[in-house]
Amino acid sequence: MERIKTGIEGIDQFTGGIPRGKSVLLTGDAGSGKTIFGLQFALKSSQNNLKTVYVTTEEDSNDLFVQGSTFKWDIQSVTESDFLTFIELAGVRARVIEAEININVGSMKGNFSKFLKDLPEDTEVLVIDNIGSYTAQLTPYEFRDRFDLLVYELNKRNITALIILDSATSKEFNEIALFSVYGAIKLMKRENPYTGRRERVMDVVKMRSTKTPTQFMTYEIGEEGIQIVSGMESKE
Ligand SMILES: Nc1ncnc2c1ncn2[C@@H]1O[C@H](COP(=O)(O)OP(=O)(O)OP(=O)(O)O)[C@@H](O)[C@H]1O
Ligand SMILES: [Mg+2]
């Protein structure tokens, strides 16, 4: 099975990467590093000559370039290579919300196909940051329907996708999303029971057909982005 590197060395060494054409869900609290993870993945993929698209729903691409520059990633210049494209949906979101408030058209609600509408035909890797922006007013049933369809379409197009969903979006939606995807990773902050210090940990909740670590992996956001510092041992 062909695998796509995430750009996070610890994960790539352990799992070999994300199976090609599959969708992985990335969840976590505000400030846990979801966007940094997404950018690191997108950068790695584009450097590996995979046609990569980063859909951003909350920040404009310039904010993301600034975030990248704190790690000495020159994302903007990579976009000139043709392998990395940013699609900004922030403005679109504002318009959709306006429309929802004014007319509340059912068909517009959480229609995730907007993520795929402007996607270039030859897209190989996709990051959606973050789908939670589009779940307002959806019932769990509607969410499942639309999320399943999105994953199905991505799979049909053989696109390897990282779908980010924030924790502010209902817990129920987080659980529903977990079932549709091939893999899922959760980012958290917790207190280390031994040292009493707060640390960032990552849980590979699932990754079908893949050897995954059973332990939480401790990670840091350092000079080169996300770095796994411990916990890469498995139970076997
Ligand atoms: N250059 C850096 N060095 C170390 N830590 C950083 C650096 N840049 C950002 N951070 C940390 O990463 C956090 C932001 O990460 P990121 O934006 O990826 O989180 P997020 O999960 O996407 O959050 P949100 O849900 O708000 O979008 C910051 O709050 C900060 O703690
Ligand atoms: Mg973010």
Image (spheres, grey):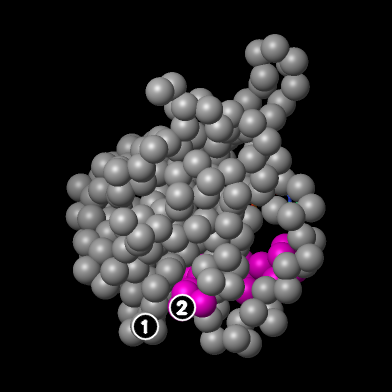
Query: Which residue is the site of mark 1?
Result: 122
Mark 1 surroundings within 10 Å by alpha-carbon count, few (fewer than 14), some (14 through 19), many (20 or more):
few
Tell me: residue 76, above or below residue 220: below
> Which one is nearer the viewer's eye here, 34 or 57?
34
Query: Which region shows up in magenta?
Result: 49-68
Label 2 near label 1: C-beta < 8 Å?
Answer: yes
- Mark 2 packing: few (<14 Cα in 10 Å), some, or many (20+)? many
* Numbered badge on residue 213: none
Closer to the camera, 7 or 92?
Answer: 7
Tag 2 secondary structure: loop
The residue carrying mark 2 is 51
- 19 left or right, relative to 59: left
In this picture, residue 73 sits left or right of residue 206: right
Give residue 206's quadrant in the image: top left
* Amino acid identity at mark 1: Asp
- Using the rendered image of the protein, determine whether residue 189 is visible from the camera's viewpoint: no
Mark 1 falls on what kind of element? loop
Closest to the observer, 86 or 211? 211
Specify the farthest residue to the top: 194
